[in-house]
Image: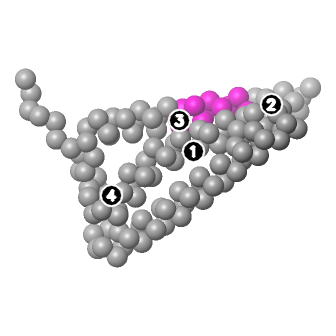
Amino acid sequence: MGPPITPFLLLAFADTRELQLLHFGLFLGIYLAALLGNGHIITTIACDHRLHTPMYFFLLNLSVLDLGSISTTVPKAMANSLWGTRDISYTGCVAQLLFFFFFMSAEYFLLTVMSYDRYVAICK
């Protein structure tokens, strides 16, 4: 049996407490803007039946994937800044990597499908 798995240490953005709190505030603002913006898009498309077309279906899915990708890494970074910690467990790191890779791959695939859809719409 090998040695026990220890948590990974993350590189902090800043060493001083004031800059860590500034980092937390900036990331909180960015995260809330992303949540509110994508939530507004999702709610608008889901509630308005005139927007149930293929283009808005793609935009809805793009918003969901964007919410997933930003919710994978930013909350942990904010928590580390707020509490002054630098560690993440091995399973937490693996989960973050897998979810982030999944959401980003799905987003790139969806953007490819959207560009092909626009190409077909323009050419026909």
| Residue 65 visible in the displayed image | yes
First in sequence, mark 3 or 2: give its number. 2
- Mark 3 surroundings: few (<14), some (14-19) or many (≥20) residues within 10 A: many
- Mark 4 surroundings: few (<14), some (14-19) or many (≥20) residues within 10 A: some
Amino acid type, residue under disc 2 in the picture? Pro
**Dominant secondary structure, magenta:** helix
On the image, numbered disc 1 is attached to which residue? 67
Query: Which residue is located at x 28 percent, y 52 percent?
Result: 10
**Residue 54: numbered disc:** 2
First in sequence, mark 1 or 4: give its number. 1
**Residue 10: numbered disc:** none
Label 3 to label 2: alpha-carbon separation: 21 Å
First in sequence, mark 4 or 3: give its number. 4
Label 4 to label 3: alpha-carbon separation: 22 Å
Residue 55 sits in which quadrant? top right
On the image, numbered disc 3 is attached to which residue? 103
Q: What secondary structure is found at the residue carrying circle 3?
A: helix
Where does the image place residue 7, in percent across and percent down from the top left? 21, 44
User: In the rendered view of the protein, which quadrant contains the C terminus?
Assistant: top right
Question: For residue 95: magenta?
Answer: no
Amino acid type, residue under disc 3 in the picture? Phe
First in sequence, mark 2 or 1: give its number. 2
Is there CB contact under 8 Å for labels 4 and 3? Answer: no
Up-down: is 63 above or below 123?
A: below
First in sequence, mark 1 or 3: give its number. 1
Label 4 to label 2: alpha-carbon separation: 40 Å
Q: Nearer the viewer, mark 1 or mark 3?
A: 1
